[in-house]
Image (cartoon, rainbow, N blue to C red):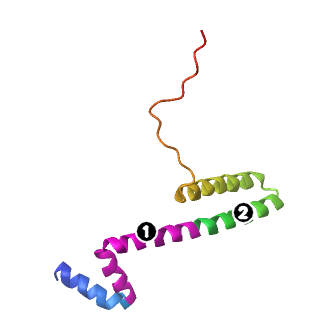
Amino acid sequence: MTPATALHNHRHNHLSPAQTAAYLAAYKPSEVDLEALSRSESEGLLGALVGQRARLQELVGLTMEAGEYGQSISAERAITTNIEVVGKLLGQLVNPPSSNPPQLPHHA
């Protein structure tokens, strides 16, 4: 069996029409498709991060009530990381590289 035949059989025997269409669309995306995909993925990523942060905030409350302060601190750290990632995703946290570190003024 050739690889092309195996792929054809797999596609027809195991993939739904929607999965096949998604694969074919992803296989040769156009520039417009790339923009839409990038926007869609960014929105999906942002949504996942917001959902994650809500779960982490709930976890903080539960662990505090249970007296598991170490777990609460870990969850708070994860929330901080989540916020940093969201800020980077939205372009709100910008750390431009600096080739010239700040200099202290010289006093004579």
The residue segment tinted magenta is: 18-47
Taking 82 as reference, is 34 left or right?
Answer: left
Q: Is residue 95 magenta?
A: no
Amino acid of disc 1: Ser
Q: Is residue 53 above or below residue 96?
A: below
Expressed as whole percent of the image width and height from the top left, the position of residue 61 reads 78, 62
Q: Which mark is residue 57?
A: 2
Q: Is residue 25 above or below residue 59?
A: below
Expressed as whole percent of the image width and height from the top left, the position of residue 1 reads 17, 83
Q: Between 75 and 66, which is closer to the camera in this rendering?
A: 75
Which of the two discs, 1 and 2, labels the residue nearer the N terminus?
Answer: 1
In the image, which is nearer the foreground, mark 1 or mark 2? 1
Expressed as whole percent of the image width and height from the top left, the position of residue 75 reads 69, 56
Which image quarter is the C terminus in? Answer: top right
* Residue 79 lies in quadrant: bottom right
Residue at coordinates 52% horizontally, 44% vertically from top-left? 95
Amino acid of disc 2: Gln
Q: In the rendered image, which residue does mark 1 sit on?
A: 38
* Distance between the alpha carbons at the discs numbered 1 and 2: 28 Å
Q: Between 7 and 53, which is closer to the camera in this rendering?
A: 53
